[in-house]
Image: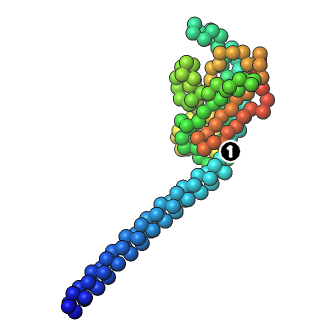
Amino acid sequence: MAGADVIGAAICITLLVLVAYVVVGSIMTTSGIVINAQDDMTRSQEERLGTSITIANYHYQYDTWDATYGDLWRIDFRVLNKGNQVIKNINKMDVMVIKGSDPPLLYKNGLGTFETKTWRKVRLERDSDRNAEIINPNQWDPGEYMYGQVSINFDPSTTPTQLQVVLANAVEATTVTEIYSE
């Protein structure tokens, strides 16, 4: 009988150790996940706080007549990265053309045609020397300008029109005044 009591106590202690191990392991795993998520959120917020862009130059001009859309005007613009963060993925950046109180026209980044509402041209250059960028190619460094063009199918001089550039981390720049003719 005494042997059964010793074996039963040993089994109980073993089960207690296993349960404690599983509980402690679960708590440690969960706390690791929470800490990593909080670290990612903090890093994202710091990056957002260090990101600042401004539309430095913008104008429009009559571009061409298109059989599908009629008259097209081209908006040329320059956006300055005036923050202290390198913007690594400019492919997630959008442009919106705001026409009066109408819903904005959304232009996704990349090369393409007017019907898919994509940008016609995007180029990054250092403003100081206007040479092709050699530091962090295809990334938007602090102090660099981004040049872009979009086409619209209305004359911006007929209604108040503004341009807005929005980054993937929700930092945006909007023209303060209406777009002017060249």
Q: Quadrant of residue 29?
A: bottom left
Q: Residue at x 55, y 59 (%)?
A: 39
Q: In front: 79, or 69?
A: 69
Residue found at the very far top of the displayed protein: 67
Secondary structure beneath dot 1 equals loop
Q: Local crowd at mark 1 within 10 Å, few (<14), some, or many (≥20)?
A: some
Residue hosting label 1? 52
| Depicted 57 relative to depicted 73: above or below | below
Residue found at the very far right of the displayed protein: 177
What amino acid is found at the position of numbered circle 1 in the picture?
Ser
Q: Would residue 52 be seen by someone viewing this image from the given angle?
A: yes
Q: Quadrant of residue 105?
A: top right
| Depicted 70 relative to depicted 141: above or below | above
Q: In front: 106, or 23?
A: 23
Q: In front: 75, or 142?
A: 75
Residue found at the very far front of the displayed protein: 1
